[in-house]
Image: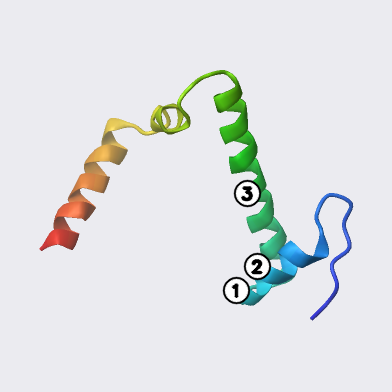
Amino acid sequence: MAIVRSRTYQIKPIADIMLRSKINPKEARKQLHAEDFKLLKKQETEEMDKDYEREQAWGYSADDVERWNEKEETRKE
């Protein structure tokens, strides 16, 4: 396993992600960055005294909701 050196990411979390998901280091960094972004966004919304889940729901369109409901119906069957 290659050692990943970075200023913003520690070696251990990237290694853990790589071992869990068995993906290459670049994908592990992308995944770690996405997780960090999500946590940062959640922290920012909570600091503004807003509900994080409700803020996320604003990103979905009616078509997205309909597609999701159709998927849920097919899973129940």
Label 2 belongs to which residue?
17
Q: Could you give the CA–CA distance between mark 3 and mark 2, rounded to whole angstroms?
A: 12 Å
Q: Identify the residue at image location x=87%, y=57%.
A: 6
Q: Identify the residue at image location x=22%, y=54%.
A: 71
Label 1 belongs to which residue?
20
Q: Identify the residue at image location x=77%, y=66%.
A: 12
Q: Horizontal placement of 37 versus 49: left or right?
A: right
Please tell me in which quadrant of the rendered image residue 58 appears. top left
Please tell me in which quadrant of the rendered image residue 64 appears. top left
Q: Quick one: label 1 or label 3, which is nearer the N terminus?
A: 1
Please tell me in which quadrant of the rendered image residue 77 appears. bottom left
Q: Crowding at label 3, few (<14), some or many (≥20) Cα neighbours within 10 Å?
A: few
Q: Quick one: label 3 or label 2, which is nearer the N terminus?
A: 2
Quadrant showing the N terminus: bottom right
- View extreme (bottom): residue: 1
Label 3 belongs to which residue?
34
Q: Position of residue 68 (x, y in %)?
A: 26, 47
Label 2 with label 1: CB-CB less than 8 Å? yes
Label 1 with label 3: CB-CB less than 8 Å? no
Q: Nearer the viewer, residue 10 or 64?
A: 10
Q: Position of residue 57 (x, y in %)?
A: 39, 31
Q: Identify the residue at image location x=83%, y=77%.
A: 2
Label 3 with label 2: CB-CB less than 8 Å? no
Q: Crowding at label 2, few (<14), some or many (≥20) Cα neighbours within 10 Å?
A: some
- Point out the frontmost of discs 1 and 3: 1
Q: Position of residue 7 (x, y in %)?
A: 89, 51
